[in-house]
Amino acid sequence: GENVEQHPSTLSVQEGDSAVIKCTYSDSASNYFPWYKQELGKRPQLIIDIRSNVGEKKDQRIAVTLNKTAKHFSLHITETQPEDSAVYFCAASMVGARQLTFGSGTQLTVLP
Amino acid sequence: EPEVTQTPSHQVTQMGQEVILRCVPISNHLYFYWYRQILGQKVEFLVSFYNNEISEKSEIFDDQFSVERPDGSNFTLKIRSTKLEDSAMYFCACTWEVEKLFFGSGTQLSVL
């Protein structure tokens, strides 16, 4: 089955700096890559997603890039704010599989 | 974001007891899922449901677990003979638009 690796496990940045979280996936058949933000004790919330027919997608301060050849995708957060502090999970799903395989998560801390 | 409601928010049970977790999905959802998250770990897929049938299940979803739709709209996850390692946050989730997964508020299960 699909395997998703996520790095780093923890990331601290100064407010206003950029943060980058990277994920790799194992199955070249995967075609959907969402990112979730999870605040402490709360549900994961979808923040952005990308499909394999697109190389980059941006939504305000958040962007995701996808390299299908290398089988990796990244989350970029610019102008970070303290409220961006949370655990971020990447995920991947294969055509027809319907269920998401999640990465291990990145604890992002934005220092004021 | 669509509202997916779970009850109870917290459940404490003794080892060996049965628990039932409940979820009210989005009314026009496509697929329905149960996931779990052990404290500090990633989100893990348990089972998916489509057209009133289980469509996929993971290795975790063994005979100890069952999913039902008792009234045709809500879903339950039954865990029989609970073990200490079943302690986790259990999330139900739905897809509303194709592939966009939205999580419920979660049930924190503690097995003592």
Image (spheres, helix red, strand yellow):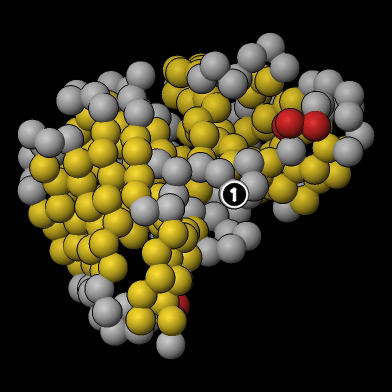
Which is more toward the observer, A69 or B78?
A69
> Which residue is rendered at x = 30% and y = 32% of the image?
A93
Tell me residue A102's x, y (percent): 41, 39
Which is more toward the observer, B25 or B59?
B59
Is residue A42 shown left or right of residue A3? right
Q: Is residue A80 above or below residue A70?
A: below
Image quarter of residue B28: top left
> Which residue is rendered at x = 40% and y = 41% of the image?
A103
Q: Is residue A90 visible?
A: no
Q: In what quadrant of the picture does the C terminus of chain A appear?
A: bottom left
Q: Is residue A46 above or below residue B92?
A: below
The chain holding disc 1 is B
> Which residue is rendered at x = 51% and y = 42% of the image?
B42
Tell me residue B65's x, y (percent): 68, 20
Image quarter of residue A78: bottom left
Q: Is residue B41 visible?
A: yes
Tell me residue A82's x, y (percent): 43, 81
Is residue B84 shown left or right of residue A68? right
> SS of the residue at dot 1?
loop
Residue farthest top in this picture: B63
Which residue was labeled with disc 1?
Answer: B40
Which class describes the residues within 10 Å of circle 1: few (<14), some (14-19), or many (20+)? few
Which is more toward the observer, B3 or A84?
A84
Tell me residue B87's x, y (percent): 74, 38
Q: What amino acid does circle 1 point to?
A: Gly
